[in-house]
Amino acid sequence: MIGPDIQQAQSLELLQRMLDGDERALSKLITLVEYSPTVAAEIADHTSRRAGKSHRVGITGPPGAGKSTLVDALTMLLRSAGHTVAIMAIDPTSPFTGGAVLGDRVRMQQHYLDRGVFIRSIATRGASGGLSRSVRDIANLFDAFQKDFILIETVGVGQNEVDILEEADTTIVVLTPESGDTMQAMKAGLLEIADILVVNKRDRPGAEALMMDLEGMLQMSSRQGEWHGDWEVPVLSTQSDHGVGIAELLESIKQHRLAITESGVLNQIRQQRRQAHFIQLAVEEIRRRLQIGVSEMSGPLGLLFSKVLDGELSPYSAALSLLEDREALAAVLTRR
Amino acid sequence: MIGPDIQQAQSLELLQRMLDGDERALSKLITLVEYSPTVAAEIADHTSRRAGKSHRVGITGPPGAGKSTLVDALTMLLRSAGHTVAIMAIDPTSPFTGGAVLGDRVRMQQHYLDRGVFIRSIATRGASGGLSRSVRDIANLFDAFQKDFILIETVGVGQNEVDILEEADTTIVVLTPESGDTMQAMKAGLLEIADILVVNKRDRPGAEALMMDLEGMLQMSSRQGEWHGDWEVPVLSTQSDHGVGIAELLESIKQHRLAITESGVLNQIRQQRRQAHFIQLAVEEIRRRLQIGVSEMSGPLGLLFSKVLDGELSPYSAALSLLEDREALAAVLTRR
């Protein structure tokens, strides 16, 4: 529809309007950033220096744990305390389900009427250039827009979703007595990423037993590593549809933020995130250039590559040969 | 437990025994290849030249479509016609479900007693270096072991699973009248990858209507592109728990193989697959080297990188600068 130049000019104009506080411009920018890695790159150059003030809270847990209701209750509390909030709901779209795993967003739309809250669903399928790329860029937009809290809600069903939580400063894992196979989920790595554990629907049978099990698992694990500072992972309980336990949860989030700020862990996390971001971008661009350049390789490498195509040489051997040939590699990669 | 050298010597000995027809050696090699990218690389150098005789059939569809039963029935028919068969069941493990999406494998174990059939489940979580990497390497092992047919069964729930189907020469999409949202799944790209559409459980209400819908969608789409040769995607119906329609399905698979062989499409597919494999391996190795090399960068690039870490410079700008500096890039990448 519109050419890249027009798109670029348009996105810079939108950026300026967004930085001036225009929420509709923010909304349009998010769409542009989600669907176009080129615009995302352009925008990131302007937002990355402004980012760093928002606190990013990841919320994950099995389907049915009540994550949306919890996010809803937390948002209301944050708003009543005067904080601005952005909510990102990550929707792991499947070609078969069409992706409605995150369930009913309708309840949360009450916040749409509140200008201090911005809600955005992000679907796996729409995200061009990778879901975590989109999540990161959109979080940076919210950050530059000066939202105090960014709540990132995801169903942690796969590696993609777990990667997303690396964008969070504080990660909350929500469970219920009924979510089943909880221990297996914990063993599968969720215990390692949780900064706060929440047993939601605490009025249901088995809630106390679950809390005790989780306490036990925490004691057995060695969560007090260098990376997490001295933070001791709490096990809280909530009944989010009645707002019960939400104040304690918010208090715990704030304590966690204080702890990682003072211990320097927050700064470490952010440096690691920027490094990972840098490497990912470089690698993606290298992949793109290799895909273009590989069929144009000449000389010994060209011969090598044609042998790979004919199945005479293993791709493994050939890839290593490419990486040993400094000149050829540089020639392939610095070609646009 | 055992060092890399011992592992290497062991894997080469296993390889020799496998090539001599030892099925236990094949089984051990698969485990080694799945968990160690290093062994996989070693083995691929020996197997890639021997691969290319097996016909690789991908089977995908929503949970509950009866894929396992279909694979089961197809296997019995192939065996009775004297073909050897390997079955790869891809298990998309989730931290919450522990991954039992592919359901009951017990029925299929009847084939374990038959030496002409080899069954292997591959879990997402176990696969070191990526699921599609494992699937490809294991398929090559089966190929070198001279299995006539390799059946790759997967729940096509995400991009990972769709990527896996790129290993298939013939892709079958299985649906049932009850699978719901079929049209949405088709629109989401499954129609594009299907070489054969199967409506399973054809005795259920709605089966004929579903077949007609699918025929209609095929006519509207332009599947007769260069890539697929002149192959016209058939819509078949089966009732796989009674073996109904399986002979027609096998006939269709063989016709598809003949069509893509004669049109040169099979050869094209394989060349594309080898190129993609080569690029993926090179990119993964480049990522590894960047991760090691990036913090050791000195000079202007080192300064650039420290600005990224401090949030003063966007990772986008920095990644592009790295890729413009031919010397520095070569230095970082050719360092081991």
Image (cartoon, coloured by chain):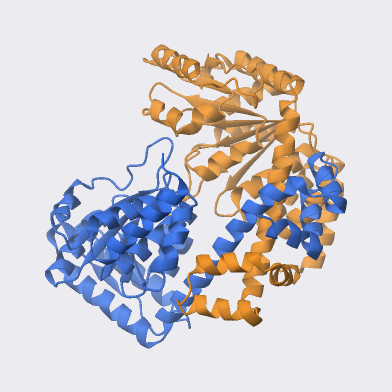
Chain colours: A orange, B blue
Foreground of the two, A8 or B78: B78
Asked if residue B215 shows in the view, the reply is: yes
How many marks on residues? 0
Relative horizontal placement of residue A18, taking residue B67 as reference (left or right): right
Q: Is residue B22 above or below residue B305?
A: below
Q: Is residue B146 above or below residue B160?
A: below
Residue A135 on image: x %, y %: 65, 44
Residue B178 on image: x %, y %: 29, 53
Q: Quadrant of the N terminus of chain B?
A: top left
Foreground of the two, B81 or A63: B81
Residue located at (81% from left, 65% from top): A6
Residue located at (79% from left, 41% from top): B309
Q: Quadrant of residue A39?
A: bottom right
Outermost residue to the bottom: B262
Residue located at (51% from left, 46% from top): A92
Asked if residue B201 shows in the view, the reply is: no
Q: Quadrant of the C terminus of chain B?
A: bottom right
